[in-house]
Image (cartoon, rainbow, N blue to C red):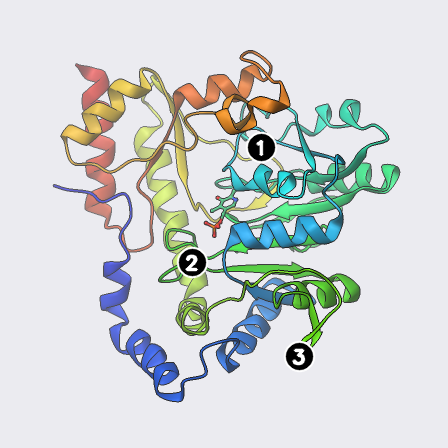
Amino acid sequence: MKVNFYTSQREYHEKKNEFDSAIQNIIEKGNFILGEQVSKFEKEIQEYTGAKYAIGVASGTDALIIASDILGFKDGKEVITSPFTFLASASCITRHKGKPVFVDIDEETFGIDVSKIEEKINEDTVGILPIHLFDQMAEMDKIMDLAKRYNLKVLEDAAEAFGMRWKGNGNCYSHSGTIGDFGVYSFFPTKTLGGYGDGGMIVTNDDNLARLAKSFRVHGATQKYHYDFIGYNSRLDTIQAAILSVKLKYIDEAIKKRQKIAQMYMERLADCEYIKLPIAKGDQKQVFYVFNILAEDRDGLAEYLKKNEVGYSIYYPMPLHLQKSFEYLGYKKGDFPIAERVSQKIIALPIYPEMTMEEVEFVCKTIKEFYRK
Ligand SMILES: *Cc1c(COP(=O)(O)O)cnc(C)c1O
């Protein structure tokens, strides 16, 4: 049995008519740039997440860059973030010469260890950039408390976290992205809400930040051909917006299926002593964008999965402080031991709503076979 790590084909064929007519409708009308489907989809995202504003941009990476620019993550100012994430979470800070300051991660959640943030705050610090990584949100209560005390801006990288909710000290669940000054989502095809190409979204509850984000995505224009800022050319594509609107209709169902697959992995793999299953901390409504395990002899297991045609992925094989592109920051091996250790052991198993139970069984059987040898 061949198990893909991910495929868009099954969902497409299940709802082919809906996707085809959404795409065709736009081509027929010809309103390609910021067409009505973009504002419709933005409204749907506001309704779903509870964010006051949603601004569609070209990718999650652009969303992070634009938000960083607006929040003043630049010119030597420091922003505290995690070294165990996708490059874009930190490169957005460096885009305008801001400085990422890393702190190590929590061993169990793989998210930023909030107890290590305060000691890194100094007079140059302007922000905190938490990432809601893989399958749970960061400890936002503590982050927002620090931000308030030290007057810092918070940019939530919720690129992987669409649909995730979390309950802190408050009495209701908040959607990822809606707690800090800005939050960003990515609609990269594999993401929980993924398009058929690149796409991203900035969300905020702040009137002024929303106004700036809207202007920055059209070159900094406040009215046509009047530029108050040097902005970007970064709009959510109208065709992608139409596709994403179709997908958003079914997102709760899709999340339930992800949860069911995760549950199955948990049950089937519980007795395997060579692996560690994911642990969620706090009151989380999980989405399971990714299902990670920590595996002994990870590279051997990966090799074995490949041989048996089981897809897998390694997020992330090298923490950011050890990347060549960040050499100039002056970090060295051993600076963030937990992130370094996790990057040696982590491996992501296939998880997507259209995966069959037989496929999940096969993945589990193959993993157990490897360790029995
Ligand atoms: C996917 C991802 C991004 C970037 O999103 P794109 O839409 O691919 O540009 C940023 N941060 C994290 C944590 C991601 O997983």
Disc 3 residue type?
A: Lys
Disc 2 residue type?
A: Asp
Q: CA distance from mark 2 to mark 1?
A: 25 Å
The residue at which mark 3 appears reads as: 224
Number of the front mark, 2 or 1: 2
Residue drawn at point x = 53 percent, y = 13 percent: 333
Number of the front mark, 3 or 2: 3
Q: Secondary structure at mark 2?
A: loop
Q: Is residue 15 left or right of residue 91?
A: left
Q: Position of residue 317 (x, y in %)?
A: 41, 26
The answer to whether residue 181 of the structure is visible from this angle is: no
Q: Secondary structure at mark 1?
A: loop
When the figure is inspected, residue 304 is found, relative to residue 37, above or below; the finding is: above
Residue drawn at point x = 28 percent, y = 57 percent: 8
Q: CA distance from mark 1 to mark 3?
A: 42 Å
Q: CA distance from mark 3 to mark 2?
A: 25 Å
The residue at which mark 1 appears reads as: 111
The answer to whether residue 44 of the structure is visible from this angle is: yes
Quadrant occupied by the C terminus: top left
